[in-house]
């Protein structure tokens, strides 16, 4: 138990999200957590009616957070990603991205298991074994070359598999678009990440550091899409919300029912 | 409340030529089949791959993407859907002006994203009938990412076989564009003319 507590303290110190949520300023952040958890509890049964439904009762708060996040992107992330794409050769950028994905694998296997997805757990374990050896400690995605692709898994998804509803849309500071369920999921993932228990203390920074660099790399790689959503759309909040909810639900396996497909020709040419 | 939508010049021509063609030739009506829908998407994918591999400059590539849009997308229907209820009170001239501005806006917006596909490839999978159209699923393989699904909805009800919607990992293009145009209209107090003007200036 003491070991767990120690680890918990370490994670708190290392993970920027946790640091933010616990220390900057702690009173506000505790409120945010209470808010997220109670929102989840309140809306525990609220599953979206269809792939495109939007449940956003906290829209005015979310919009303010969105503006804050946009300011952060404009001041830090976007310039950093500009420097990144200027100076980091694409081979190195791919390596960093691969390494970050590699470090995510233990947590994903854990969630595969929690979801009783043994095939997924085996695939991800095989990826870990292959990329950790042939893939030069995860820098090269050798597993993908033989068709072993990541079976992405996180605790938000695990909650979904366990029947917990999505809950309200929430835009988190720094972290970005989420839902009540995924907010709890991200927090649990940060605490459960096997890596933080396996790695020696002096290597704890690696995960966080690589994640940050990989995030800058992703921002650079998908610059046109992110810029188009954040800076070129008339209402970036609605676009980001739509983007997140639809891709997330798709990732969780939700598909349009035939009757939900919109037929724009209906009545147009009849 | 429902009043018939004004037909655009182009769809009238399509109707007229379609009608005369059916009078002249006792051929079965033009109909999308599973195979033809799949073939259309294969052509779109081949064209996009060719543009990316061409190694041309960005401006030249964007122009090529515009052509893919012109050739394979039913931009009129997409534009009309993006306008939403606004289309009902709009004049034919407004709809036509909007459609033209929208065409340019769409091809620039989606064409610009080609960078993200460099080094990747798209494989056409299966087609299935949904309502009156075909859904063609494809798998996109991008470097360093698990493959993901891109689906196209194909119909010939405009008179030509074209795609009118696509879903990139579940993200509905029609819905994004309706949200976007709706937000533009809101910001301009519902003025369609101002929206058209600003859409033209965006490009």
Image: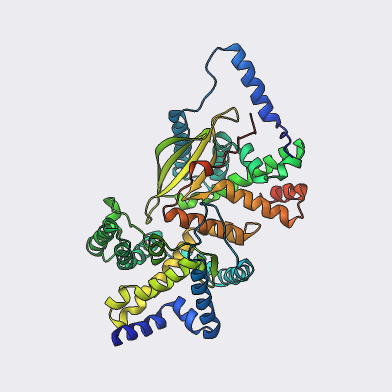
Q: How many numbered marks appear?
A: 0
* Residue pictured at 48% horizontal, 46% vertical: A256
Q: Which image quarter: residue B20?
A: top right
Res. A95 visible in picture: yes
Q: Which of B127 and A43 is in front in this view?
A: A43
* Residue pictured at 62% horizontal, 69% vertical: A67
Relative to residue A168, is residue A30 depicted above or below?
below
- Quarter of the image where the N terminus of chain B is located: top right
Relative to residue A148, is residue A105 depicted above or below?
below
Q: Which of A94 and A239 is in front in this view?
A: A239
Give the colour scheme of this rendering. rainbow
Q: Nearer the viewer, residue A74 or B150?
A: B150
Q: Which of A22 and A1 is in front in this view?
A: A1
Res. A87 visible in picture: no
* Residue pictured at 36% horizontal, 73% vertical: A207
> Residue B55: percent from the left, percent from the top?
47, 45
Q: Which image quarter: residue B74?
A: top right
> Residue A24: percent from the left, percent from the top?
52, 83
> Residue B188: percent from the left, percent from the top?
75, 55
């Amino acid at each position: 138990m003491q070991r767990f507590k120690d680890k918990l303290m370490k994670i708190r110190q290392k993970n920027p999200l946790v640091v933010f949520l616990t220390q900057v300023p702690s009173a506000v952040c505790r409120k945010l957590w209470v808010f997220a958890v109670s929102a989840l509890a309140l809306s525990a049964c609220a599953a979206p009616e269809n792939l495109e439904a939007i449940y956003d009762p906290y829209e005015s708060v979310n919009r303010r957070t969105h503006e804050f996040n946009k300011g952060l992107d404009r001041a830090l992330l976007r310039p950093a990603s500009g420097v990144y794409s200027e100076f980091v050769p694409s081979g190195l950028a791919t390596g960093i991205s691969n390494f970050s994905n590699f470090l995510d694998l233990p947590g994903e296997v854990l969630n595969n298991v929690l979801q009783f997805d043994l095939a997924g757990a085996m695939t991800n374990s095989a990826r870990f074994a292959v990329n950790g050896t042939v893939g030069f400690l995860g820098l090269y995605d050798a597993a993908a070359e033989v068709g072993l692709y990541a079976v992405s898994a996180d605790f938000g998804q695990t909650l979904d598999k366990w029947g917990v509803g999505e809950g309200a849309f929430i835009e988190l500071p720094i972290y970005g678009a989420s839902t009540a369920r995924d907010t709890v999921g991200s927090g649990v993932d940060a605490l459960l990440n096997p890596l933080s228990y396996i790695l020696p203390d002096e290597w704890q920074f690696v995960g966080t550091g690589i994640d940050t660099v990989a995030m800058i790399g992703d921002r650079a790689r998908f610059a046109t899409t992110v810029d188009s959503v954040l800076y070129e759309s008339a209402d970036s909040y609605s676009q980001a919300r739509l983007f997140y909810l639809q891709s997330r639900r798709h990732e969780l396996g939700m598909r349009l029912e035939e009757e939900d497909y919109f037929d724009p020709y209906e009545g147009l040419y009849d | 409340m429902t009043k018939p939508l004004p037909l655009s010049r182009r769809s009238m021509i399509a109707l007229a030529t379609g009608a005369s063609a059916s009078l002249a030739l006792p051929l079965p009506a033009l109909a999308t089949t599973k195979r033809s829908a799949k073939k259309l998407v294969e052509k779109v994918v081949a064209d996009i791959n060719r543009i990316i591999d061409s190694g041309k400059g960005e401006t030249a590539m964007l122009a090529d993407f515009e052509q893919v849009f012109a050739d394979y997308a039913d931009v009129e229907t997409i534009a009309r859907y993006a306008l939403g209820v606004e289309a009902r009170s709009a004049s034919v001239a407004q709809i036509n002006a909007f459609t033209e501005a929208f065409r340019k806006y769409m091809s620039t917006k989606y064409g610009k994203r080609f960078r993200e596909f460099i080094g990747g490839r798209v494989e056409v999978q299966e087609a299935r009938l949904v309502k009156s159209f075909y859904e063609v699923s494809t798998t996109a393989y991008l470097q360093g990412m698990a493959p993901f699904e891109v689906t196209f909805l194909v119909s010939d009800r405009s008179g030509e076989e074209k795609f009118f919607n696509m879903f990139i990992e579940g993200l509905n293009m029609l819905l994004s564009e309706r949200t976007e145009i709706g937000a533009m209209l809101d910001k301009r107090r519902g003025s369609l003319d101002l929206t058209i003007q600003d859409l033209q200036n965006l490009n």
